[in-house]
Image: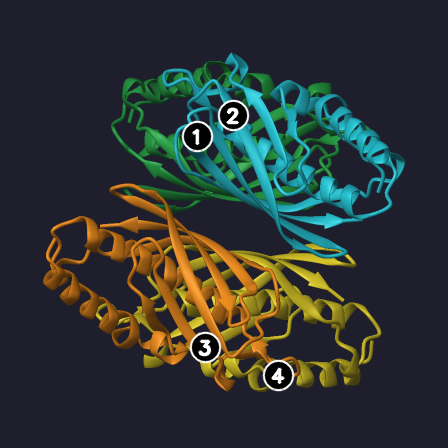
Chain colours: A orange, B yellow, C green, D cyan
Amino acid sequence: MTTLRMRTVHAVLRRVMEHHIAFNKHLGVRVESFDPQAPKLGFDMRPELVGNPARQILHGGVISAVLDVAGGFAIMLSIASDAEITAAKFPKLGTIDLRVDYLRPGRGRHFTATARIVRKGSRIAVTHMELHNDQGELIATGGAAYAVG
Amino acid sequence: MTTLRMRTVHAVLRRVMEHHIAFNKHLGVRVESFDPQAPKLGFDMRPELVGNPARQILHGGVISAVLDVAGGFAIMLSIASDAEITAAKFPKLGTIDLRVDYLRPGRGRHFTATARIVRKGSRIAVTHMELHNDQGELIATGGAAYAVG
Amino acid sequence: MTTLRMRTVHAVLRRVMEHHIAFNKHLGVRVESFDPQAPKLGFDMRPELVGNPARQILHGGVISAVLDVAGGFAIMLSIASDAEITAAKFPKLGTIDLRVDYLRPGRGRHFTATARIVRKGSRIAVTHMELHNDQGELIATGGAAYAVG
Amino acid sequence: MTTLRMRTVHAVLRRVMEHHIAFNKHLGVRVESFDPQAPKLGFDMRPELVGNPARQILHGGVISAVLDVAGGFAIMLSIASDAEITAAKFPKLGTIDLRVDYLRPGRGRHFTATARIVRKGSRIAVTHMELHNDQGELIATGGAAYAVG
């Protein structure tokens, strides 16, 4: 695997995650790490993302959306890192199911989502995800199963 | 329970669901039925809600967000219908956890979310939710547990 | 599809569900309906299945086990009904994930589990399940995703 | 907190987990660690626990049962360690919901379940659980929400 190839793959992945997916763009999601062991997405608090005006915390739907995206990102990154894949041939990913534990109010100015692949088959992948705020507090955890390919 | 009181409660609930919660407003969520047995929220497809530009289908995060909101709405409506509650004293609701089964691609021009309360305790409520498109196809189902009060 | 073939398939399925799977046998699971639209498994309360000696209610693990089994049974029955399958060629089924909502204490003398297929693909199937007691009370609901084939 | 008190509490917890709960006894569950940071339950493979006779692997229902039990054990241990609780006054615990990711076939001679508390409120607690076999392979993960008190 050449560094050049990976740089191209990363550029494509960033473009897909940050620009092509319209809803991600609204969420303000940015790729913060391409490390296949610890991929990271981040986003800033913005008035449009608030779920409770009195408490100024993230809408639960923002949290579930970002966790789902983080799981999918981890799988795409892992596939790209493993195989002789070119940017043009990314496998299709479909979320089978998702679940989220809301552990603490989504308070903060910046949030970071990470994902870990716990099952990686040729057809099914499962990830566990976490969302932290900029104080390092664990806001939510998630799990999702994806159909691959 | 007077009709007048319920009309006021509905007006307040509509304002909260459609205007006060900023992220709901972005999703374009509208209350379509206040029937406590079959409450309904609806929203239109819009370019910002797309998760896959090639296929023009809803982002999974839109689906999970709307299902979570539908479950909470059903509980608030039920509490308002049961008790001598006034608009000023709505109980606090916190989503404990949420899960979503993504059954079909989120294709359509208009979508409707419904919720059914399957457990209603003084402290914990559980709802099951469904999202249909305007062809009547079941796009996704969900379940959520909420801490009440 | 001949009635004769289906009778053989049902006999095989019953043997698998009630005898070959050792843990099912311990649970006392019996096939109560082979209707593909509403397959049913039943079992009786027994001292070994109790989770709370003071309250004499089912162990949560009994409930999750039976719901998982009911989902798998519904899929096998559906495949057998659709296709020119013979008893010897049942597809392999693997549970990807399972979730259970415990709605009421598992009190009763007899319990019935049903399952409904909500997604049926060539590789992935999803079912929703319910457990009722002999008073018709809904004790628990579940959802599971299965890898097929 | 005196060592004497904790020793008594541990003895009571062990008796409850291993003897009073009939279904645990059938599963053969044993307390292997009372460390509140890393409580552990273990059990041996036995013919009655098999879900697939051809492959000699654990029944999915055994896995979900043990993970649920492990989560509840972690919460009871944590409450006992924190508070001036006596063996007679354990709080009541009810599982609200449970989900399990089945990651690898349940192959092995001995299995160990651990749980971590990720949310601990006065009324609701959430745990994440893991099941490993005696080769250190991660067989399954779980998450559960409990009503406390």
Q: Pinpoint the chain carrying mark 4.
A: A
Residue shown at the point (64%, 19%) measured from the top left: D26
The amino acid type found where label 1 is placed reads Gly
Q: Nearer the viewer, residue C66 or B134?
A: C66
What is the number of the mark on residue D136?
1
Q: Pinpoint the chain carrying mark 1.
A: D
Q: Are marks 3 and 4 on the same chain?
A: no
The CA distance from mark 1 to mark 2 is: 9 Å
The CA distance from mark 1 to mark 4 is: 47 Å
In the drawing, does residue B115 fall left or right of residue D72? left
What is the number of the mark on residue D111?
2
Q: Residues within 10 Å of mark 2 (few under 14, many from 20)?
A: many
Q: Residue furthest front?
A: D3
Residue D133 screen position, x and y as percent: 46, 27
Q: Are marks 1 and 4 on the same chain?
A: no
Q: Pinpoint the chain carrying mark 2.
A: D
* Pointer 4 residue: A53
Residue shown at the point (62%, 70%) measured from the top left: B73
Asked if residue C6 shows in the view, the reply is yes
The mark closer to the camera, 1 or 4, is 1
Residue B107 screen position, x and y as percent: 32, 67
Residue shown at the point (22%, 52%) measured from the top left: A79
What is the number of the mark on residue B43?
3
In this rendering, the answer to whether A82 lies above or below B28 is: above
The mark closer to the camera, 1 or 2, is 1
The amino acid type found where label 4 is placed reads Pro
The CA distance from mark 3 to mark 1 is: 48 Å
